[in-house]
Image (cartoon, grey):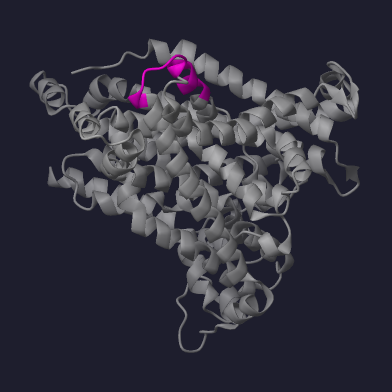
């Protein structure tokens, strides 16, 4: 038995190294001078080869802080809308029996399988007509629409699991339907909201397509688009490229490590159903 | 419904945003594919796309590449995902949470980072890949994989597998840990252990998870764009060897270098992608999903 787990560990360690190796190579080399990057790409930076020149170039040239701020605004705003609107719609669908209930559920679920990207041509025309191109609002609207179907689907599963006694008691006490939703139901589904938040956040933060098409202007660039443009311009400046990559990896990595337990729990509990 | 206005209030924001930004543009795009400029053109754009040699060559190339991209995912990603999940779920493995977290890291990185990182590593100039092959005496195997027509697409597909293998691993892992102890014990009592236990007991139970992963991969692959754009540019080089439907649509819609942007043809390609995804999803729902037995305990 011990021999078998030993084999499992060896295989998993090898795969973990394959998964992390590229990130590791980029990060250690971003702290080296140019000669060391080329001479010994796999060595750790030491007293001789340590250099921050790449980070200096990035900080002087690129507007990383602005891009970071834009990404943060877009992600937080979209996430808030997805969670709030999604929970409200999920509540309406799971709590009340009304005509067209099932049909509405199906209509909203369509978006889980059909990618919003296929509507890009008309989305761009609509945004231009509304004067919203090159604004962060355009991105927020698109990501809200993109995130809603899955959020509604997952949240209504959770909501139908809440016992009705509590809600009936609330109604007896004269609470309005809105207070029942905000004061009784929302606090109860917090774990589900956290799971949905993580699932929604990662694709929004990483998206390149819509920033590239809807909001490519300098002042509204997201960090993903900003990094892409920067890497394109500085292909030959290896210090700057490696530093930019490290800076771009950092925020997602930190977010992931903070929320990883929630993400993994969400995937495992969601799939078991 | 009108006697209970709160239902409307709860539904309205989600339905309005979803309809205005997602459903209407989807139909708007389908509609645009039937026009040429302002004039209604029927199926002319589709005829051009499939029939005009200048268009059809690029289209069939992109479609074929897209299919190969998907095939590589299916034959590489699923077995690795299953193997990792099986190792992770083997009896009370210490440190399973650490491995899971680490192997999932590439999945949360953006395509921009992933594409560029691999471009650097595989680059003949920097030479991490040739250097490492040299260290084990296999330097003769090294090729500029991303720069050769014969290898570029497969290389990119493998990079994408590297990035996303965490998802099948997680879903299959979830399916495996939900197999009840009694089932495994009963199999062991009958002398079914090790590999035959995996093939005869566990694999049939995780088939639904594999089905879901396959359809998610299908939708993701036929809608892909970012990785190719980031690592090979909008022209999807070398010599269009890595051009897939997503990059083809982007170039057509926006124009690139000497080519002028054409919203109608862009919408036509998007409509074809829509049809492909719709057919794939329907086939899955009606043929595969219904036949997979749901195991209830």
Q: Is residue B233 above or below residue B137?
A: above
Residue A81 is a magenta residue: no
Residue A96 is a magenta residue: yes
B187 or B285, nearer to the observer: B285
A258 or B197, nearer to the observer: A258
Q: Position of residue A223 (x, y in %)?
A: 60, 61
For the point 41% across and 62% down, the residue is A254
Q: Is residue B183 above or below residue A49?
A: above
Q: Image check: A264 left or right of A54? A: left
B164 or B216, nearer to the observer: B216
Is residue B277 visible in the rendered structure shown here?
yes
Q: Is residue A138 above or below residue B69?
A: below
Q: Position of residue A189 (x, y in %)?
A: 29, 40
B284 or A206, nearer to the observer: A206
Is residue B173 visible in the rendered structure shown here?
no
For the point 25% across and 45% down, the residue is A8
Q: Residue furthest left?
A: B189
Magenta stretch secondary structure, dominant = helix
Q: Which residues are magenta?
A: A94-107
Q: Is residue A224 above or below residue A11?
A: below
Q: Image check: B19 left or right of A250? A: right
Q: Position of residue B32 (x, y in %)?
A: 79, 27
Q: How many marks?
A: 0
Q: Position of residue A173 (x, y in %)?
A: 21, 35
Quadrant the N terminus of chain B occupies? top left
For the point 61% across and 42% down, the residue is A142
Snapshot quadrant of residue B294: top left
For the point 48% across and 72% down, the residue is A28
């Amino acid at each position: 038995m011990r021999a078998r787990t030993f084999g499992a560990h060896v295989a998993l360690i090898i795969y973990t190294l394959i998964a992390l190796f590229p990130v590791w190579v980029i990060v250690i080399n971003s702290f080296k001078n140019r000669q060391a990057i080329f001479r010994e790409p796999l060595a750790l930076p030491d007293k001789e080869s340590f250099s921050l020149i790449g980070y200096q170039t990035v900080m002087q040239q690129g507007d990383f802080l602005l891009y970071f701020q834009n990404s943060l605004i877009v992600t937080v705003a979209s996430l808030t809308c997805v969670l709030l609107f999604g929970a409200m719609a999920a509540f309406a669908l799971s709590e009340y029996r009304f005509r067209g209930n099932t049909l509405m559920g199906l209509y909203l679920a369509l978006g889980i399988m059909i990618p919003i990207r296929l509507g890009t041509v008309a989305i761009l025309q609509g945004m231009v007509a509304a004067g919203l191109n090159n604004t962060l609002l355009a991105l927020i609207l698109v990501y809200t629409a993109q995130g809603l179907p899955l959020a509604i689907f997952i949240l209504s599963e959770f909501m139908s699991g809440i016992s009705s006694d509590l809600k009936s008691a609330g109604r007896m006490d004269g609470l309005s339907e809105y207070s029942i939703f905000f004061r009784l139901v929302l606090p109860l589904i917090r774990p589900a909201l956290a799971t949905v938040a993580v699932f929604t956040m990662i694709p929004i933060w990483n998206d390149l397509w819509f920033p590239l098409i809807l909001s490519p202007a300098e002042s509204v660039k997201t960090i993903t688009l900003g990094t892409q443009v920067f890497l394109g311009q500085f292909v030959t400046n290896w210090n700057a490229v490696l530093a930019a990559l490290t800076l771009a990896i950092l925020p997602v990595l930190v977010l992931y490590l903070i929320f990883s337990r929630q993400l993994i729990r969400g995937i495992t509990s969601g799939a078991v159903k | 419904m009108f006697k209970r206005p709160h239902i409307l209030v709860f539904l309205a924001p989600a339905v309005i945003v979803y309809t205005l930004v997602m459903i209407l543009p989807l139909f708007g795009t389908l509609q645009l594919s039937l026009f040429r400029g302002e004039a209604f053109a029927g199926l002319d754009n589709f005829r051009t796309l499939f029939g005009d040699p200048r268009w059809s060559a690029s289209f069939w190339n992109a479609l074929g590449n897209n299919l190969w991209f998907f095939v590589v995912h299916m034959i590489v990603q699923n077995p690795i995902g299953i193997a990792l999940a099986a190792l992770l779920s083997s009896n009370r493995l210490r440190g399973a949470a650490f491995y899971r977290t680490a192997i999932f890291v590439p999945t949360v990185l953006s395509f921009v980072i992933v594409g560029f990182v691999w471009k650097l590593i595989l680059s003949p100039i920097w030479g991490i890949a040739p250097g490492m092959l040299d260290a084990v005496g296999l330097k003769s195997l090294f090729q500029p994989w991303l720069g050769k027509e014969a290898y570029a697409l497969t290389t990119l597909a493998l990079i994408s597998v590297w990035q996303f293998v965490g998802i099948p691993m997680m879903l299959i892992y979830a399916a495996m840990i939900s197999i009840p102890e009694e089932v495994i014990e009963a199999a062991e009592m009958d002398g079914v252990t090790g590999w035959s236990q995996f093939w005869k007991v566990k694999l049939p139970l995780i088939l639904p998870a594999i089905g879901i992963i396959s359809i998610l991969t299908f939708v993701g692959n036929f809608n892909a764009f970012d990785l190719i754009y980031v690592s090979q540019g909008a022209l999807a080089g070398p010599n269009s060897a890595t051009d897939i439907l997503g990059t083809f649509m982007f170039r057509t819609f926006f124009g690139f270098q000497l080519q002028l942007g054409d919203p109608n043809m862009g919408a036509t390609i998007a409509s074809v992608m829509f049809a492909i995804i719709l057919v794939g999803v329907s086939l899955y729902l009606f043929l595969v999903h219904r036949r997979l037995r749901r195991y209830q305990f």
